[in-house]
Each structure stands twice: as C-alpha cells, then as structure tokens.
Amino acid sequence: PLSLVREIESEEKPKGPEAVKAAEPLDLLRTIHTIRSFEEHLAKAFKDGEIPTDEYLVPIGKARVVRQGDAVTLYLFFVTYLIACKGRIPPRKKWKRNKRRNSMALTQDQLLILQELLSFDTINPPGNEDECASFIGDILEDHGFIIQRLEFAPKRTSLVALSKGHQSDKGAICFCGHMDTVPLGNAPWEHDPFGGKIVDDKIYGRGASDMKSGLAAMIMTGARLGEMDLRKDVVMLFTAGEETFCEGARYIAEHSEVLGKIGALVVCEPTSNRPMLGHRGAIHLKVRAKGVAAHASMPELGDNAIYKAAEVVLKLRDMDFHVTRHPLLGSPTINVGTISGGKNINSVPDYASVGVDIRTVPGLTAEDVLDQVRRLIGDRGEVEILNYAAPVSTDAEHEWIKEVFDIVEGVTGEKPKPAAAPYFTDASDLTPALGSPPTLILGPGQPEMAHKTDEYCYISKVEEAVEIYTKIAMKWAEAH
C-alpha cells in the first residue's frame, strides 16, 4: 500500500523553518486517532478482498518529540496525503473544533482526551498512575493551571492543578477524581479494555465509568475555564491509589497545605450526574482464632480454631451497633466476606481467620467498632483493623448544595433528591483533612457499571458533566 501513497502539497503549508512549528498535545492525539481509524478501515478492506475502487483523503501529520527531563515538546508538520486503497472506505467526518462555548456537544479533541485516558493501564495493583498524571498535567498546564505532583510511592503520582488567580477568603472549589482502576477480572471482554471503542452513545474500557469519564469531564472543564479566563479559586485534584483504600488521598490529606483553603469539594465518582450528599464509611477487620492442633481421630486432644471462628461469625451476623439511624446514610451494616483455616482435613486446625466488612455512619468511629466487636466475641479471637474510611455527609439545606441542585436540574432537566452513594470515596480522607467543607459526589459514570466486564459510560453524560462542572465553578467565582 505504501506504493499507492503520494504526497500532495497544501497551499497552507508553510515553507522553510516555519514548516516545523510547536503544537498542542491534542493535535498529536488527533493525528494518532485518525491514523488508527484509517488503519482499521484499510485492514477490513484487505480482509474482505475488495478491489481498489476509491480514493481516501486523510489528514495526518509527521511528528517529532523532544524530551528534556520531565519536559516534552511536540513538533508537528502537517501535510495531506491522498491514499488510493482497497475497498470503498467510508469518509471520516472532518475534524472540527466546537467554537460555541455553551454547547454541550463534545468535540473530537475532547473525545480523544477520554480515549487517551482509557488507553493508560492504571490497574491497581500496581497502579502506575505516573504517565496518566503527566498527560493530564500537560493539558491543564497549557490552559493556565499550576501543576504539582505528589508521589506516595514510585510511579504512584497524584496531581494537583491550581488556578493562578487569587484565592478568596472562603477558599477554592475543588474537583477530585482518581486515576487508578480495578483489575479486568477473569471473564473475557468483547471490547478492548484499553481501546476506548465508541458504539453509539457508549464508550467502552476499564475505568470508563469508574472513573476516567469523570477525569475527562474535569480536564475539559479546566480547559474551558482556562479559555474563558475563569480559573480563579479552582483546584483540580487527580489521585492515585483510590481503589486500595484511598492511599493517594490519604497522602495528600497529610500534606493538605498544597491545596490551600478549600471551600467546597466535588468528588467526580460515578453517579450518572445525580448529586450525592455523602456516603457511609468502611472498616475492614480481620478476626484471628487460635486453637491447638491434634490428629483428627482424637479431636478431644485439640482445640478446633474453626469452631471458634464459626461462633464468631454467628455472633457478628446478629451484631447491633446501638446507633441511631442516620437520616441520609441509614444504619451501619456488617458482612463476613472471607473465612479460612486449617491445613489438612485429617487434623484439628489450630488457626482460622475471618474477614469482615462494616459500613459506618457518622457517630460510629473505628474505635467504637473495634471495642464492640472485641466485647462481642470475647476470648474466641483477636481483632485487627486492616483499613478504615470515614463516612461523609452534607446537609441538604446547605446553601451551596441548593445552588448545585439548581444547576444540575437546569442541565439535566431532572430535579435532584437528597441521596447518598453506596460506595466510599477519597472524600473519606480529604473532607476531614480540609476542615469538613460541604462535599458532593457527582460524576458522569454509571455506578452500576463500575468494576464490570465491558464497562462503559455514556458520552452524553460526560457532556452533561462538563456543563455542570463549568456552571458550578462559574457560580463559585461569582459568589466568592
């Protein structure tokens, strides 16, 4: 096929030294996407054995990348190729930038941001969010944000994008999202989990809903605010390690001075753009039961640790936490998720363990839970807290919450009702560390698609989220 390619000079192509010019990273992404799309069409035509019947005009470019330390400069030299190829290739839509700032329709460049985010393998473990963070930082830095990187471990980078404008006394509004995803699971995927394939209004990939669609909406909002010069009092926070009990957020909470004063927090986790006023906390416990080993034919000589663990499970099943039902988050729940013990069937086991998940509400601390469980099981086992995430709740009557509800209704046409997310988020660590500002969970992803095989998000929900986030930021700037 290379012999069928001929270069056509463009009238707009600069001559001499100006032929190589600096360009934005999005231009390169656009180029890559066009080439990929053309390659797919061409491969199908060859596979179908069709004869050359058409000519296909494809805008592609030559690129040179200069890397100096952490700085990357992209140079693009745009030309136009006329390619004669096999098969009747359906013409691609021309690349167009949407100049109407108030339009909700995503441009090709914006779709490419989401597809590129999905192409990063940030499965946790190991996470490796570093490259994804660099990609995000480059875009927002180009739109006037100050970028800071924080690593809690090698290649486990969280990113803070700060506005250059002066912060008001009431602080900035912070949009937050995490870059890591969960593993793919054992079931086969119909769509490439890192391909960002678009089918009608759906885009597929690991993290499409949880929560790279939210990240894309944050980036697009930042870019739009930059173009409108409305970055004042806006902070964008992209965390690593959320899927493993908020490791990145916990590290940032310990260094919260990098964020400055935060007056309100929007966590862009999947809610299908329905604002959630909080979520329950979570405590993971391990209960260890010890016994005495003996031969299975003489059990009276031993002390069966599995029997003790079984008694613990029955005690936990009927546990009452003695707290008042929360009006938004409901009551605490408990679930025994794992149980293990013994080495072989013909021995009395001398060890067993039970894994317990407890969801908490305000007023029930980790220390309260630990004390209650210890008193409940007595000398049947030892209890250890493995992980803890605090509950979060904001009053529906808070003035800022009312403003956001009005904005969401104006964009989606649906009147929000006070509700809570079923999962916990980075707000568990961030909200208390930031002085407990009003906190919302609000993002474009589909909560029911989180962690699923062939995970997807609706593109139209991303469009809505960008509009919602932009209006929230603009309203904050006006009011503060």
Image (cartoon, rainbow, N blue to C red):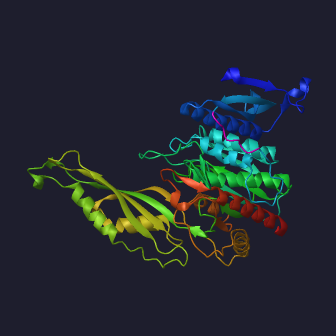
Q: Nearer the viewer, residue 99 or 400?
A: 99
Whole-percent x, y for residue 18 in the image: 90, 28
Front residue of 9 and 153: 9
**Residue 209 lies in quadrant:** bottom right
Q: Is residue 152 visible?
A: no
User: Is residue 77 left or right of 244 when viewed as pictured?
Assistant: right
Q: Is residue 204 above or below residue 9?
A: below
Mostly what secondary structure, the magenta segment? loop
Residue 70 to residue 199: above or below:
above
Q: Is residue 245 magenta?
A: no
Q: Position of residue 118 (x, y in %)?
A: 60, 45
Picture residue at 83% right of the left edge, 63% below the top: 168
Looking at this view, name the residue that lies furthest to the top. Answer: 3
Q: Residue at x 19, y 55 (%)?
A: 304
Residue 88 falls within the magenta-colored stretch: yes
Give the x, y percent position of residue 320: 38, 74
Residue nearest the viewer, comparing 13 with 150: 13
Task: Confirm whether residue 366 shows in the render.
Answer: yes
Q: Quick one: quadrant of the C terminus?
A: bottom right
On-image quarter of the N terminus: top right
Q: Nearer the viewer, residue 203 or 403?
A: 203
Residue 406 sits in which quadrant?
bottom right
Q: Residue at x 48, y 50 (%)?
A: 453
State which region is magenta. 87-94
Left or right, 295 with respect to 330, comes to left
